[in-house]
Image (cartoon, rainbow, N blue to C red):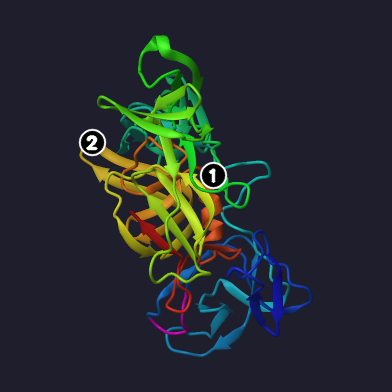
Amino acid sequence: MILSIVGLFVVPAAGGVWGSRTVWAAPGSRPVVTLRRGAVKVYAEARQRAPRRGIIGGRNAVFPLLARIKAKGCHRPWLQIGPEAFACSALLRPGQGQPRATQHPLLRKGRLMPRSYFVTRRIVTVRSKPSAGAPRVRTLREYSGIVARGKVRTSSGVWRRTRSGYLPASDLRFVRPSQLAGVQLGPKHTLPVSWINGATAWVTNRPTWSRSARVAGLKAYARVTVYERRKVGRQGFARIGTGRWVPADRVRTARLRKLPNGVGAAEKWIHVSLADWSLVAYVGPRPVFAALISRGWKTPKGRYRITRKLAMATMRFNTRTGVYEAEAVPWVIYFKPRYALHSAYWHDGFGSHSSHGCINLSPRDARWLFEWTAPGLPPGWFQISQTPKSRGTHLLIE
């Protein structure tokens, strides 16, 4: 995306994000504000109790200074750093320079995810020190995702240091995020799109489960074309070629959906089919992207708008046996309180593995959707919310 500068106002050339995907870099010296460290809340208006617009942060992030406004709620002038974006903080230092900030979450070159992650193998107890006799900090449920911050060797074994304490390394499993990538749609690739789900599938020469009929095997996420579906007793089968059948419950298909009422012919919108375990992104009636998802047990159906986007978030909820937590989840897109579309690093079972309530995407697909949807997250921002003047992308869940 090309960044245009008109006077003191930053104007996106297209798509609604205020800068390029990686950095702002405006030519010449202009009024700016610099954030050396920490994080600052941003509001949609220069007034007390205005709606929250987002949070900016990072080291030495430089934002354009569009205006200074004296108003209630700030003992110093409010600083406007973007459209509907006002901040009041002693951490912001006005000056002259070039706007420059990094896109969050930070990714090292060649890395798929911003962190290295581990998953708990069982219910585990976090200790204050690397010792089984140390005070208990909290209990984590199995399959909780954590970021390890180093390891300690003791006479009792190896311990991993976490955000809240220490865990035995034997209770953790290192996870490699899914390599699954969605399908860019256009003249060469159109709907429907079908995949084998996140489990392998046997191919048989006729619609049967009989081992003697097996002729091949398909890996998870293999792309297939479905020519016929047939019911044999209580079992369903899909024909994917001449003399090639697979169990129908192993196939997930993204299908075309007509433009919903109230969505413009050039507007972006997203359709999630819980029955098909699929997501399709559209511009008006034209599909542009399709992906496999993991649906939630209680994912709410209905029509929504994207309300808030976070570069990274930690998700948790309490249970009788401990806290379930997924730490540092990147590319989080909320559409309703407590419900979001987001990446999942703790499993590689898209199209088959259910979540607690949110809609899981592979890291690549979550990042694509995060960057494609509105409101766009500008460089230097950790999170951003929609406003009445800057609405989020339409979302339809059926």
Image position of 91 with respect to 333: above or below: below
Residue at which label 2 appears: 321
Q: Residue furthest right?
A: 28
* Main SS class of the magenta portion in the image: loop
Q: Is residue 323 visible?
A: yes
Q: Which residues are magenta?
A: 43-48
Residue that appears at 73% across and 80% down: 30
Q: Nearer the viewer, residue 105 or 306?
A: 306
- Mark sitting on residue 357: none
- Residue type at numbered disc 2: Thr
Residue that appears at 45% across and 26% down: 169
Which structural element holds mark 1?
Answer: loop
Image-based side of 28 in relation to 87, left or right: right
Of badges 1 and 2, nearer the viewer stands 1
N-terminal of the pair, mark 1 or mark 2, is 1
Residue 16 x %, y %: 58, 70
Magenta-drawn stretch contains 142:
no
Q: In which quarter of the view is residue 60 placed?
A: bottom right
Residue 77 x %, y %: 53, 86
Q: Is residue 163 visible?
A: no
Q: Residue furthest left?
A: 320
- Residue type at numbered disc 1: Gly
Q: Nearer the viewer, residue 180 or 35?
A: 180
Residue at which label 1 appears: 182
Residue 31 x %, y %: 69, 81
Which structural element holds mark 2?
Answer: loop
Q: Nearer the viewer, residue 278 or 316?
A: 278
